[in-house]
């Protein structure tokens, strides 16, 4: 039998070009004669394209990368070296795939995939548009990743996990930790690298999980719930929408953590999307939170949200990143309240309305208006509502967004940078 197999191999590569029955390109790649490859495709040495594969215009394929039979790659796009695109994989246009990446057979990938080096995807997965796979991330088989989902570097998503769609990077699910098989992760939820989610968990939209947290098998975290750092949620427990589990707290298996409406810091009706509410898990001592939300592309809050902070004799603003780590903490203990914002005009009209001054931890003073005109001249979408800012190089301002009544966060005048962040206000 060995002699017979060797004879076939020799016959298949009669010209000794190393390509068996395939066509060798000028760059030393091997392309099967039944493959449909656009003339603009470039290959690195040792690349291989199998039978009936299709590669569109302006695709660059690195050295020693294998495109298996019936795989389809729309252009433009790029694949690094030593990667494997298995049989019947379909990849949309605009994808940027790194080195040593593995995409399992019969998987479907939307447009603009960004896959880092050593990322791995199992078989029969469905990846939506604009998905990000960090370096050395692992996606098991039969997984669904919705539009804009992000699996961070070394993140692990086990078999049959489902991750929800988002309409932009702002509201995407971010998984940097490990998610067990059969779990469901809603859009806008964040799982840090040191957090662990066991199998068959259901994580709703906009759920924030702290570093080192452990989520047990079959746990349900409803929309907008919060789990603190190093907290442990026992198997089959439920954390209701808007409820918070404190740092280091342990929730017994089968327990329900109820949300208490009276404990919300926001004005009744002030939060238009329940999952956008954000409650500081560790509010500063001596201060009362009077507003808090996570900014998304939707209409997160009503235009009177900040009225819940009236009246005040001191004011504090905190800003948080997408992992719910505090970016900035600014406060003012006023020598005297100069003005409260419902009574004054746009901050962009000199003289600006000074809400309070004196003993500010940052630089400058707090400003506000009812007109809500942004300080950023290039931002024209802001129309009505309350505007609040702190004149500090680090602290962004808050103003109504393009779809009134919602809010945007601004760092300087780069509004897009702060999409997806959270703001909390205290008095």
Image: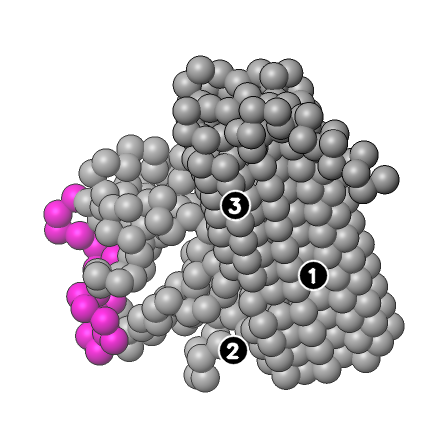
Left or right? Give the position of 189 relative to 314.
Answer: right
Query: Residue 252, relative to residue 265: is it above or below?
Result: below
Query: Which residue is depicted at the point 81% across and 42% down?
Result: 2
Left or right? Give the position of 364 relative to 80.
Answer: left
Give residue 224's position: percent from left, percent from top: 64, 58
Q: Tag 1's secondary structure?
A: strand
Foreground residue, 198 or 209?
198
Distance, label 1 to label 2, CA atoms, is: 26 Å
Looking at the figure, which quarter contains the C terminus?
A: bottom left
The image quarter containing residue 340 is bottom left
Give residue 44's position: percent from left, percent from top: 43, 35
Query: Which residue is depicted at the point 28% across and 46% down?
Result: 414
Give residue 415's position: percent from left, percent from top: 33, 45
Quick check: can you spot residue 322? yes
**Earlier-in-chain disc, 3 versus 1:** 3
Distance, label 3 to label 2, CA atoms, is: 47 Å
Q: Tag 2's secondary structure?
A: loop
Majority secondary structure of magenta residues: loop
In this figure, which residue is indicated by the disc labeled 3? 82
Query: Which residue is depicted at the point 55% across and 44% down?
Result: 83
In this figure, which residue is indicated by the disc labeled 1? 179
Q: Read off the magenta span.
A: 349-368
Give residue 318's position: percent from left, percent from top: 39, 67
In this figure, which residue is indicated by the disc labeled 2? 282
């Amino acid at each position: 039998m060995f002699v017979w197999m060797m004879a076939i191999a020799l016959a298949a590569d009669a010209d000794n070009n190393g390509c068996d029955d395939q066509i060798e390109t000028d760059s030393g790649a091997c392309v099967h004669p039944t493959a449909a490859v656009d003339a603009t495709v470039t290959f690195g040495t040792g690349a291989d394209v199998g039978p009936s594969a299709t590669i569109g215009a302006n695709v660059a394929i690195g050295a020693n990368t294998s495109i298996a039979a019936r795989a389809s790659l729309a252009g433009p796009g790029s694949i690094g070296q030593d990667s494997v695109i298995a049989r019947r994989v379909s990849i949309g246009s605009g994808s940027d795939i790194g080195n040593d990446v593995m995409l399992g057979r019969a998987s479907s990938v939307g447009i603009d995939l960004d896959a880092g080096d050593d990322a791995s995807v199992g078989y029969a997965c469905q990846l939506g548009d604009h998905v990000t796979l960090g370096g050395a991330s692992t996606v098991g088989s039969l997984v669904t990743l919705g539009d804009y989902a992000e699996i961070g570097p070394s993140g692990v998503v086990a078999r049959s996990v489902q991750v929800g769609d988002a309409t932009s990077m702002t509201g995407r699910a971010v998984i940097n930790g490990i998610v067990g098989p059969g779990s469901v992760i809603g859009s806008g939820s964040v799982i840090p690298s040191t957090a662990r989610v066991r199998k068959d968990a259901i994580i709703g939209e906009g759920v924030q999980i702290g570093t080192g947290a452990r989520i047990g098998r079959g746990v349900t975290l409803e929309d907008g719930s919060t789990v603190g750092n190093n907290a442990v949620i026992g198997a089959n427990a439920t954390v209701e929408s808007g409820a918070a589990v404190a740092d280091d707290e342990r929730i017994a298996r089968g327990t329900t953590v109820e949300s208490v409406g009276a404990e919300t810091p926001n004005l009744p009706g002030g939060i238009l999307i329940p999952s956008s509410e954000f409650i500081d898990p560790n509010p500063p001592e001596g201060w009362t939170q009077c507003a808090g939300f996570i900014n998304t592309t939707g209409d997160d809050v009503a235009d009177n949200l900040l009225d819940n902070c009236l009246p005040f004799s001191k004011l504090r603003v905190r800003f948080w990143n997408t992992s719910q780590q505090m970016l900035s903490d600014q406060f003012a203990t006023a020598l005297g309240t100069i003005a409260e914002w419902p009574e004054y005009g746009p901050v962009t009209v000199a003289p600006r309305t000074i809400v309070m001054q004196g003993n500010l931890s940052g630089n400058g003073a707090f400003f506000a208006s009812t007109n809500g005109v942004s300080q950023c001249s290039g931002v024209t979408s802001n129309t009505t509502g309350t505007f609040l800012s702190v004149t500090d190089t680090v602290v962004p301002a808050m103003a109504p967004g393009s779809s009134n009544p919602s809010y945007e966060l601004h760092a300087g005048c780069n509004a897009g940078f702060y999409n997806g962040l959270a703001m909390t206000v205290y008095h």
